[in-house]
Image (cartoon, rainbow, N blue to C red):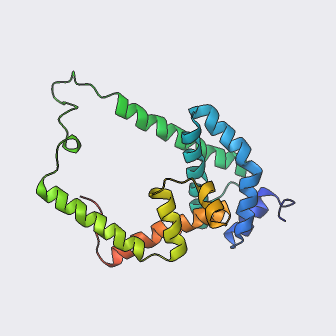
């Protein structure tokens, strides 16, 4: 339906609320973007995650009106993917470079490796309870996508297939679920960190 439109026209339509325009952009560029990511990370599962995160970031940026790459959508979306790949390798390197040779820092003497205190356990239980309450407060369509993604570890493609909506709609519902949870938490002064 929108295949004859340029990338910039599709971006403009999407920003104006035509979700199908973004579906066309994904369809048009998914093979090149996914191939680039997979070639870089050499893992199908990781490539899927980075691919999905790339388009989530694109959606957020477009909806916030921060896209200014007129005529260069593919380069822009590829740059987002590239930055996410770099972030992944930086995080992986930071985790694997720790050494126990340093006498001032013992990698095994860390809070996250120790047993929780009673207080920590109570705070964690309260956070989990608060998160469940926030999830219950979401509209059904957003709650469904969030549960499938985080609790069933489903990809956005699987979620889209299961809920019979486009990938773009599934991504949008996830974004709004997170935004709504943050808003509700702020309104009720709910702190979700230890």
Name the residue: 60% across, 66% down. Answer: 63
Name the residue: 54% across, 40% down. Answer: 46
Asked whether residue 66 appears in the rendered view, the answer is: no
Name the residue: 59% across, 38% down. Answer: 44
Residue 19 is situated, as x and y percent measured from the top left of the image, at 69, 68
User: Is 70 situated left or right of 83 in this image?
Assistant: right
Q: Quarter holding the C terminus?
A: bottom left
Q: From what the image shows, is residue 67 above or below residue 44?
A: below
Name the residue: 55% across, 47% down. Answer: 49
User: Is 41 situated left or right of 132 in this image?
Assistant: right
Name the foreground residue: 23 vs 144. Answer: 144
Residue 136 is situated, as x and y percent measured from the top left of the image, at 41, 75
How many marks do you count on the picture?
Answer: 0
Quadrant for residue 61, please give it: bottom right
- Given the current orientation, which residue lies at the most extreme left position? 118
- Given the current orientation, which residue lies at the most extreme top position? 101
Name the foreground residue: 37 vs 78. Answer: 37
Asked whether residue 29 appears in the rendered view, the answer is: yes
User: Is 141 situated left or right of 161 in this image?
Assistant: left
Residue 68 is situated, as x and y percent measured from the top left of the image, at 66, 58
Quadrant for residue 65, please give it: bottom right
Residue 41 is situated, as x and y percent measured from the top left of the image, at 56, 33
Q: Quarter holding the N terminus?
A: bottom right
């Amino acid at each position: 339906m929108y295949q004859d439109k340029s990338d910039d026209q599709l971006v403009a339509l999407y920003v104006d609320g035509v979700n199908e325009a973004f579906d066309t952009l994904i369809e048009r560029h998914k093979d090149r973007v996914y191939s680039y990511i997979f070639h870089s990370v050499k893992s199908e599962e990781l490539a899927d995650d980075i691919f999905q995160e790339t388009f989530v970031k694109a959606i957020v940026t477009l909806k916030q009106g921060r896209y200014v790459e007129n005529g260069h959508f593919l380069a822009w979306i590829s740059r987002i993917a590239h930055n996410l790949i770099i972030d992944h390798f930086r995080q992986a390197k930071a985790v694997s470079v720790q050494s126990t040779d340093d006498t001032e820092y013992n990698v095994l003497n860390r809070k996250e490796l120790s047993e929780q205190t009673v207080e920590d356990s109570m705070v964690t239980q309260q956070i989990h309870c608060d998160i469940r309450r926030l999830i219950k407060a979401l509209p059904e369509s957003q709650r469904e996508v969030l549960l499938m993604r985080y609790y069933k570890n489903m990809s956005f493609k699987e979620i889209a297939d299961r809920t019979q909506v486009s990938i773009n709609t599934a991504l949008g519902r996830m974004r709004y679920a997170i935004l709504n949870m943050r808003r509700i938490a702020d309104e009720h002064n709910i702190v979700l960190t230890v």
